[in-house]
Image (cartoon, rainbow, N blue to C red):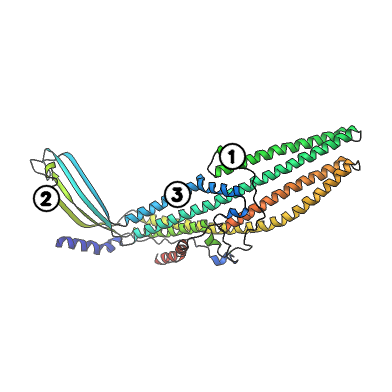
Amino acid sequence: MKKSISLLSALLLSAPLLSACVATPPTTPQVAEVKQENLGLAGADAPHFPAAWWKAFGDPQVDRLAEQVMAGNPTLAGALARMRAAQSQLAVNQAEDLPQVTLDGSEQRTLFSKNYIIPPPYGGSYAWYGSLAGNFSWNLDFWGKQADLIAQARATADGAALDAQAARLALGGSFAQTYINLLLNYQNGDIADQAVAERGEILKISQGRFDAGLENGSAVAQAKALLAQARADQLRFAAAREADVHAIAALAGQGAEAYATITRPTPNLAVALPLPDKLPADLLSRRPDILAARARVEAAVQGRAAAKADFYPDINLAAMAGFQSLGLANLLTGGSFTMGLGPAIHLPIFDAGKLKAQYAGATAGLDIAVADYNGAVLNSIKQTADAMTQVKSLAAQAQQQREAATNAEKAFRIAEDRYRSGLDTQLPMLTAESTLLQARSALAAVTAAAAQQRITLLLTVGGGFEYAPAALAASEKINTQIAKDVSHD
């Protein structure tokens, strides 16, 4: 017993000396995180939106389809599955930090060597050799490696959960954009229907003037050509509507059986969504993709710490108790009982640079995570600034297009009356009609684009996502941890 205690003491005392045989490499992170005070986020906090922000448009069909999209979309289902996988890995790492107990048993018909430690009559003959033992092991984690792995897995799971939230947010936006595009194609179809009616009237007028000898055949042919173009537009926009319906059904995880249930949208596009006019100060804490990138930086920090702990010895406590015997009859007797208890140690002495390379790789992984985070931050600011610019511009454009459409309508009616009365030729009327169609199409397009950009801006400032304070608090520790690691290298 004294011998065992002396051996354990020697191992524990020599562990730090032996571990010094492989020195920690002087590898430090090379990429610094962008500082929020240099990003121009000086506006008031962004307004908060309900999770089902689309209900503001007052369209029952939007509400029904959005619920189906959130419940049945394959991409979102995949993101949620990845979140569950990351959570499972966290549970695995947490379990490995606790004592492990197993029960192992075996019974084999064995030919024992007659020149080994087992004497005759068993040596040189066949006999049953059996064992039944309970095994206990516990990683004592002196250097915190397992704790770092648990923290890494937790941050990875947080990142996966935030990725799922980001996917949900993006999915809601994609659905809304497609739904508004469906409305636009219905409106373009209405414009094509108006064009067919107006060009049919133009043909009637031209044909009447031709029959009266007041117009040549060219005017009639021109009117027929324009009417055919308008009818072709009807077909084109009808096909575009069907494609949008197909896209919405696919987003909802449904097939062709859902097509007939998707009818003309009736959203109130003039709804006043509370949107920021300056880059909000809390932008980075409102977006799940930014918080997910921060979580991945945290995971990389902990992974680097775990790689650093590989330079120190692993010390485990192991024990076993059970039965071993030759012959089945003796397996569970008192004389077959056996047991053992003691430490197990793994020391890195010479590995041809493997640990240094792993640590350098973990440091590079941290640099990658920080660079990705910086890129996500800068991209989010650009997206938000672009959306704010577009919202302002499209609002002004819509006002001008409404005025253009009103005046084009007046000009066409005047030109049509003058042509009908024989006061003017067909050309001014056709020119005015072309201007009117362009104005109508442009007004429909800018109205839809304005609605889509308002949704884009809503999404760029977080939409209906509400961050978890715990996740934000964890992300705020990242810079401190990086600075601490650098100072110790």
Cα gap from disc 1 to disc 2, whole angstroms: 76 Å
- Which comes sooner in the sequence, label 1 or label 2? 1
Q: In front of the other: label 1 or label 2?
A: 1
- Please name the residue shown 64% across and 54% down the image: 453
Image coordinates of residue 184 in percent, x first then y, are: 67, 46
In the visual, does 113 lie left or right of 87? Answer: left
Select label 3 or label 1 by which is in front: 1
Which residue is rendered at x = 47% and y = 47% of the image?
78
Tell whether label 3 touches label 2 (CB within 8 Å): no
Visible in this render: residue 390?
Answer: yes
Q: Which residue is mark 2?
A: 334
Tell me whether the residue at label 3 lies in contact with that at label 1, contact meaning CB atoms closer than 8 angstroms: no
Residue placed furthest toward the left? 121
Vertical side of 157 occupied by 261: above or below: above
Secondary structure at numbered mark 3: helix
Q: Secondary structure at mark 1?
A: helix
Expressed as whole percent of the image width and height from the top left, the position of residue 397 reads 72, 55
For the question of whether residue 307 can be seen, the reply is no
Q: CA distance from mark 3 to mark 1?
A: 30 Å
Give the crowd class for mark 3: few <14, some 14-19, many >=20 residues within 10 Å. Answer: some
Q: Which residue lies under the disc numbered 1?
A: 259
